[in-house]
Each structure stands twice: as structure tokens, then as C-alpha cells.
């Protein structure tokens, strides 16, 4: 094998090892350790200077008791469930909002499309944190939305939006919307419009053509968009802590608590490893789906 | 990140002009809204050392950075109970008092109270101290609870009957279990510093009962919310509540804030300046501490943030609304009624935090 081929093949593996495998091994190792009042705050630490015997003791001190601990307390699985639930419904809402937008852009005159795409991407030029903070201003009891609704007379008491799950949903849908629009748009744009014409010529209704032609053809874009929203939403920390109330217990907040309040890095790491395992399932399903898709083509 | 970025910038600078001497830097990590920035400028002018100033709003964040090591900070300001644990973990270097001639200004009364946390007062000097108590929007609370509302009592926030009514104008609590749970224990007559999980568990009923009426648990938002009238009660740190009072005065929005130390007793806490063991520039850090210890500088800091300090010599430079305010410098009787807290063992700490999650989220 010549060097060129080797470099070509090895480069992606190198990044995978450097950016995923090694950090994962470190986190996994901490999850098997015990907390300690020291720098770093866990024990044992890897020490090569002690020779083989030190390495032996090092491994003998690792155990799975932190994972057992996660099972003893309702908090963890309930938080995982809340996170999955919030991520799932956010994904559904995002899809409902994003699909018509993507469809509209794909059907817009060719010369307008770049500008419409620009409008979708433009908010990304502002810091994510600032955009989430602005939502506090919009949703607050004395905020823009409530003042507007009071002014036009739809409500006579301010709606309680901030610090509720509704605010978390709004925040997630808003933040991740472009991740859903872009892949769906990319799919719809490639679609051959003569297929729809053909369907209609053959007596299919407009709605029927949408269900049996447009939607199936946009499927891989929809799946990709859902993954891009669901996976980061599950571990979301910033949005629930800024917009959510104290009863919004997503796993990101639990993880924060383990790290910062309990100073228990080993338990925090095991929470993270379990979260990773939960996230792997949709990714594997997605991979399978992609493979099947490729085989069909 | 920030630190290495700076490194690159200075490397580039060296490459560009070898004649320019590199400016010395001191990296300070302090609480948000906790210093008069004019003081920082004064220090830079006097010493020629650049200050890189970052802020945090919870001890937990600071502690996690310290325990991870290599923070890149030369000065940090943990609260005393956190500090004592961090000393054991080896996070700090002992101060070199020969470089701190102004340490003669320190107040022995406060030093003595800090001694249990920092044995021999070797690792830290006091920056500010204060109490955790109740800030109220006087008019709104009286509107809701009547003229004789117990604004100087824990009964205001821990009695369900009062909280039911206060919910309509908004109540915030610190999101800090080690502040709120001891206060709940003091309210029911238990030892706030108890380490017995059976005693600590008694706080749950009090707090779970009032939780539905709390708009938010947060450790900094209440300053603005109280000042602009969005909430009417906050259980929080004295100086922050006094800052809220001043912001409301400045805004002239008709909001009148008052801070009271609860008559059942309150937590007395100390924010301590210390130097991390691996500080990149411990020399400059000592200069900074000595600068802060100067009587006039320390007084300027207190006049700005409305917290008392542990610097006796500074008292003659304090403004009357600071030194004369019993909410900041309490009289002897109130001072004797204040309690201090020692650190929890990890198991008890986990119990306290778990209880807190249970109170807040019901799980």
C-alpha cells in the first residue's frame, strides 16, 4: 500500500480517534473511578512512573458502582425520560413548522431562493446565547408578547410562559429550525416536478400526489433533519436552564448538578456515558435506514 | 481558551516588535457585579499590570474549574466554606505576607470568624462579607399582606399562608441549597449547621410547601427583577439586594426596596481572595491583593457594592449609607445572632443537593 492511499484512508480515522474515541475513553475511565477531594477530583489517576504494578492497582480500583448508583435513584431515569419526551415533541413541532417553509422555498422562483435561504441562515450570525436571552425578553410576564396580547385585548391576565416547559419547546424549535429546513429543502429542490404533473395527469388529486410522491421523496431529508434536531435537543442544557422552570428536569441539568453541585465527576461521567448509549440507538437506526436507501437505488 | 488566545496574541506581538516590552498580566476571576471598575483602572495605572477580569455567579462553577486545575487565574474569590474544602484539595498557595504590607489593615473580628475555614488565615484574605436575608418591595408586599407584613422575619417566606399571597407579585430564592436549607432549619428552630441528614430532611416539608409559590430559583436574576418590580420578594445576598434598592432609586420607577436580616438569625458568609496553587503570575497576584487591602481602595469597593469588608482601616473612608446601615454593618446584638456554616462531607453534600432537586422538581 503506498503512502498516499494510506494517508487518505487514515485521515478520517485519525480524527475519529482523536476527537471521539480518546475523549470517550477518558470519560468512561472517570465513570469507573471514585470521587476524591483533590485535583483532579477523582481517584485513581493514571501514573506510568509506578511501572507495571501501579498499572495493575490502577485497573483493580475501577468498578461499575456509579452505574449501579444511577439505578438506585428515580431522578436519573425520570430525567432521561423527560429529555427524550421534550426532544421528541420539539422534533415533531420543528418538523411541522419547517416542512412548509422548506416546501415554500423549494417552490419559489429560482432567483428568489438564494435570498430566502439567506433569511433562514442570517439569524445564525448572532450569538446563540443572545438569541435565547432575547426570548426571555419576549416571553417574560412583562415581556413583548404578553404586552402585545394584552394591548390587542385577547387576554386580560399575562400568560405564564417564561420558566415553563412551553418556553423550552419554543426555544428549542426556534433554535433548531434551520437544521430541519436545510436538509428538507435540499431534498425537495432536487425533486423533478414533472413527476407531480404525471401523477395529476394520471388522475391523482393534488393532496394524493403530495402524500404519494412529494413526501416519500423528501423522506431522507426529513429523517436527517429529525436527527439533527433530536440528538442535540436531548442533551440541551442552555435552553432549559434559561427558559425553563425549576421543575424542568432535563438530563443536561442533572449532569450539571453532578459536576458542579455534588462535585462527583465519576457519577457525572456515568450519566454522560448512559446518555451517549441512548443517543446511539437513533443514530444506528438512521444508519440502517440510509443503507437500505442506498441499496434500493 | 481565552488564555491561550492571549498567548497567541502576545506571541504575535513579540514577533512584530522586539523592542516593546511585554505587558504584565494578572487574571482575576471574581463574582459578577462585585467591584467598582474604576478600581481596576486605578490598579492598571499604578502598577502597569493589565487585568484580565472574568466573572462567575456560583461557587460551584469556580470550584469545578479549580479542581480541574490549570485555571489560568491568578486571583479567585471563593466563599469561605468552599475555600476550606479547596484548601484541603490543595488548590491554593499560601500567601506571602511579606509582600502584603497592607494586611495590617485586616479586622481581627472578621479574621477570627474566618479562622475555622482557613486555619491560621494563611491562604486567604477577606474581600467582602455579608448576610443572606430578605429583600422586599415594601409597597407591594404591604399591598398584599397588609401593613404589619413580617418583612424582618423568615415567617414571610417560609410560612405557606404568606407565600400563597406573595405568589401574585413574585418571589425568588437563591438557587443555592447550602444557603436556603440552613435558613429553613433556623426557621423551625433546628441547628442551621446540622450535619445530621435526619435533621436536614426536616427542611423538605417547609420548602416543598412553599415551592409552588416561588417564581424562580436563581442566583443573580433577582437584582434586576426586584429593581424593576417584576418580583416583590427575594431571599438572597445582602449586597445584591442593596444594589437592587439602588438601581430602583436610580430608575425612579416608584419601586422601594428594603433589605432585612431575619430576626430568627441569618447566615454570615465571607468571600475570600486567594491565589490558585498553579497561578501563572503569583507576583502580580500579591500586588493586586496588596492594592485591594489598601484602606481607601477597600472602602471604595464597599461603597460601590454595599457589602461590609474585613478591613478595619477602611472604615473611616466608608460612606455613611454603608457604615451607618445596620443591614450592612449590623449592630452587636444582630451580629451575635448570625450563624456561620461549615462544610458538608461528600455524602451529606449529596444528600443536601438531592433534597434540593427533590424540592425544586418533585422527583
Image (spheres, rainbow, N blue to C red):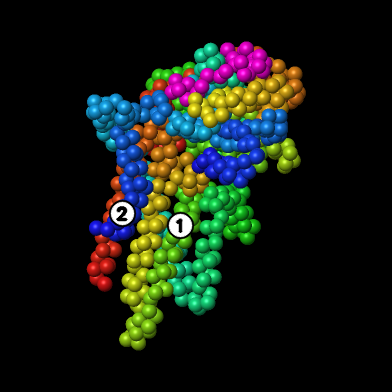
Direction from residue B87 to residue B77 in the image, left or right = right
Please give the chain letter of the residue carrying mark 2: A
Of residues A52 and A101, which is closer to you in this image?
A: A52
Judge whether residue B8 can be spotted in this image: yes
Figure quadrant of residue A66: top left
For mark 1, does the 10 Å Cα neighbourhood hold few (<14), some (14 to 19), or many (20 or more) residues? many
Residue B345 lies, with reference to residue A267, above or below; the image says above
For mark 2, does the 10 Å Cα neighbourhood hold few (<14), some (14 to 19), or many (20 or more) residues? few
| Kind of element beneath mark 1 | helix
Picture residue at 54% right of the left edge, 25% below the top: B275
Q: Mark 1 points at which residue?
A: A176
Figure quadrant of residue B336: top right
Rendered location of residue B293, percent (x, y) = 66, 21
Picture residue at 27% right of the left edge, 68% below the top: A294
Discs 2/1, front:
2
Rendered location of residue B285, percent (x, y) = 59, 27
Rendered location of residue B94, percent (x, y) = 52, 19
Rendered location of residue A289, percent (x, y) = 27, 62
Chain part drawn in magenta = B87-114
Q: Mark 2 points at which residue?
A: A10
Amino acid at each position: 500500500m503506498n503512502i498516499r492511499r494510506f494517508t487518505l484512508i487514515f485521515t478520517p480515522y485519525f480524527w475519529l480517534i482523536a476527537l471521539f474515541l480518546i475523549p470517550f475513553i477518558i470519560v468512561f475511565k472517570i465513570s469507573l473511578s471514585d470521587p476524591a477531594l483533590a485535583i483532579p477530583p477523582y481517584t485513581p489517576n493514571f501514573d506510568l512512573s509506578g511501572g507495571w504494578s501501579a498499572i495493575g492497582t490502577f485497573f483493580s480500583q475501577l468498578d461499575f458502582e456509579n452505574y449501579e448508583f444511577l439505578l438506585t435513584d428515580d431522578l436519573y431515569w425520570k430525567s432521561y425520560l423527560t429529555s427524550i419526551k421534550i426532544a421528541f415533541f420539539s422534533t415533531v413541532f420543528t418538523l411541522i413548522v419547517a416542512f412548509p417553509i422548506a416546501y415554500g422555498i423549494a417552490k419559489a422562483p429560482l432567483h428568489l431562493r438564494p435570498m430566502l435561504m439567506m433569511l433562514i441562515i442570517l439569524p445564525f450570525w448572532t450569538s446563540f446565547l443572545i438569541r435565547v436571552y432575547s426570548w426571555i425578553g419576549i416571553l417574560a410576564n412583562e415581556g413583548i408578547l404578553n404586552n402585545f396580547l394584552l394591548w390587542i385585548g385577547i387576554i386580560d391576565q399575562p400568560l405564564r410562559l417564561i420558566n415553563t416547559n412551553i418556553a423550552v419547546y419554543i426555544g428549542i424549535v426556534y433554535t433548531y429550525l434551520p437544521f430541519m429546513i436545510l436538509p428538507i429543502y435540499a431534498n425537495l429542490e432536487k425533486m423533478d416536478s414533472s413527476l407531480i404533473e404525471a401523477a395529476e395527469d394520471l388522475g391523482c388529486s393534488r393532496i394524493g400526489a403530495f402524500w404519494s410522491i412529494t413526501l416519500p421523496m423528501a423522506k431522507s431529508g426529513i429523517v436527517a433533519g429529525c436527527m439533527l434536531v433530536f440528538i442535540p435537543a436531548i442533551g440541551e442544557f442552555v435552553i432549559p436552564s434559561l427558559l425553563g422552570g425549576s421543575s424542568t428536569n432535563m438530563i443536561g441539568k442533572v449532569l450539571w448538578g453532578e459536576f458542579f453541585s455534588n462535585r462527583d465527576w465519576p457519577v457525572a461521567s456515568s450519566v454522560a456515558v448512559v446518555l451517549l448509549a441512548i443517543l446511539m440507538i437513533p443514530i444506528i437506526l438512521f444508519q440502517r435506514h440510509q443503507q437500505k436507501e442506498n441499496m434500493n437505488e | 481558551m481565552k488564555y491561550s488566545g492571549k498567548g497567541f496574541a502576545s506571541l504575535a506581538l513579540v514577533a512584530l516588535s522586539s523592542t516593546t516590552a511585554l505587558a504584565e498580566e494578572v487574571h482575576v476571576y471574581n463574582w459578577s457585579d462585585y467591584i467598582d471598575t474604576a478600581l481596576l483602572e486605578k490598579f492598571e495605572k499604578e502598577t502597569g499590570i493589565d487585568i484580565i477580569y472574568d466573572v462567575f455567579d456560583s461557587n460551584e462553577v469556580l470550584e469545578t474549574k479549580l479542581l480541574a486545575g490549570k485555571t489560568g487565574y491568578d486571583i479567585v474569590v471563593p466563599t469561605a466554606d468552599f475555600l476550606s474544602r479547596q484548601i484541603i484539595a490543595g488548590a491554593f498557595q499560601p500567601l506571602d505576607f511579606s509582600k502584603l504590607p497592607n494586611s495590617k489593615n485586616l479586622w481581627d473580628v472578621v479574621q477570627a470568624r474566618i479562622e475555622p475555614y482557613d486555619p491560621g488565615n494563611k491562604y486567604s484574605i477577606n474581600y467582602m462579607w455579608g448576610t443572606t436575608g430578605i429583600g422586599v418591595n415594601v409597597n407591594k408586599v404591604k399591598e398584599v399582606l397588609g401593613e404589619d407584613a413580617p418583612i424582618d422575619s423568615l415567617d414571610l417566606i417560609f410560612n405557606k399562608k404568606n407565600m400563597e399571597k406573595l405568589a401574585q407579585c413574585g418571589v425568588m430564592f437563591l438557587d443555592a441549597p447550602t444557603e436556603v436549607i440552613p435558613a429553613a432549619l433556623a426557621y423551625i428552630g433546628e441547628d442551621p449547621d446540622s450535619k445530621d441528614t435526619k435533621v436536614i430532611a426536616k427542611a423538605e416539608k417547609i420548602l416543598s410547601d412553599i415551592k409552588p409559590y416561588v417564581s424562580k430559583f436563581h442566583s443573580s436574576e433577582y437584582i434586576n427583577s426586584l429593581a424593576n418590580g417584576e418580583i416583590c420578594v427575594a431571599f438572597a445576598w445582602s449586597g445584591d439586594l442593596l444594589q437592587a434598592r439602588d438601581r430602583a432609586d436610580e430608575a425612579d420607577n416608584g419601586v422601594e426596596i428594603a433589605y432585612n436580616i431575619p430576626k430568627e438569625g441569618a447566615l454570615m458568609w465571607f468571600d475570600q481572595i486567594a491565589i490558585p496553587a498553579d497561578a501563572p503570575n503569583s507576583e502580580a497576584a500579591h500586588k493586586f491583593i496588596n492594592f485591594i487591602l489598601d484602606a481607601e481602595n477597600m472602602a471604595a469597593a464597599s461603597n460601590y457594592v454595599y457589602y461590609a469588608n474585613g478591613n478595619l482601616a477602611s472604615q473611616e473612608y466608608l460612606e455613611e449609607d454603608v457604615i451607618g446601615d445596620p443591614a450592612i454593618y449590623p449592630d452587636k446584638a444582630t451580629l451575635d445572632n448570625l450563624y456561620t456554616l461549615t462544610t458538608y462531607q461528600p455524602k451529606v453534600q449529596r444528600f443536601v443537593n438531592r433534597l434540593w432537586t427533590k424540592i425544586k422538581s418533585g422527583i
